[in-house]
Image (tube, rainbow, N blue to C red):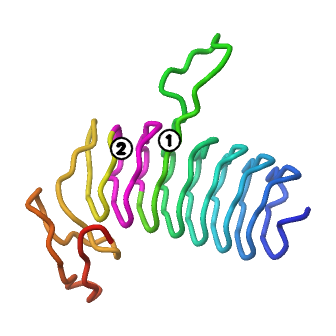
Amino acid sequence: MTGHSGAFIHETAIVEAGATVGEGSQVWHHCHIRSGARIGAHTNLGKNVYVDDGGVIGDGCRIQNNVSVYKGVTLGDNVFVGPSAVFTNDLYPRAAAETWDLVTTRVNEGATIGANSTIVAGVTIGRWAMIGAGSVVVDDVRPHSLVVGNPARQIGWVCACGRILQRGLEPFVTQHCSACGRSSQPGL
């Protein structure tokens, strides 16, 4: 299997020819990685993860059980995706459609997608943002935002370590995290 040197691939996983799995990555039970998919280095794919042709997962990511990363979805480095989170890639899906309109979705560096969340096609999730479990994201999410609900709405700001820096929607100013000592500011 070319493109998989130094990766652990469980015997029940299917990694098609033409897929790339980075060094030090782990592909666990019953995963299916399609030809044309790209998995970065030191990424962990839990049980029953599906990565479609054209799905991109960066370095250092952790994708929990039962997640599908479809064509048009790109996850940046160090992204966490909780169990059974869902990504979509077509805003007008029909079983009988002769064509479909691929809509791209981008999850930027360090973002967290909570368990059972749904990320609707076409959104961009900013760096270090956090999506609460069970949320339905239909709009772009700003960097360091904490969003929850259906539809997901911002309720605060979080540090790169995941701790809440500020509750509410007041303008985000540079914040010092008491948990990790980092300073965070908007747009970073």
Which mark is drawn over residue 134?
2
Answer whether residue 80 is magenta in the image.
no
Number of marks drawn: 2
Give the image location of residue 112, x and y in percent: 41, 60
- Which stretch did the figure color magenta? 113-138
Give the image location of residue 86, x and y in percent: 50, 41
The residue that mark 1 highlights is: 86
Which mark is drawn over residue 165?
none
Nearest to viewer (mark 2 / mark 1): 1
Q: Residue at x 34, y 76 (%)?
A: 161
Give the image location of residue 88, x and y in percent: 52, 36
Mark 2 residue element:
loop
Farthest left residue in view: 170
| Amino acid type, callout 2 | Gly
| Amino acid type, callout 1 | Val
Q: Residue at x 35, y 37 (%)?
A: 138
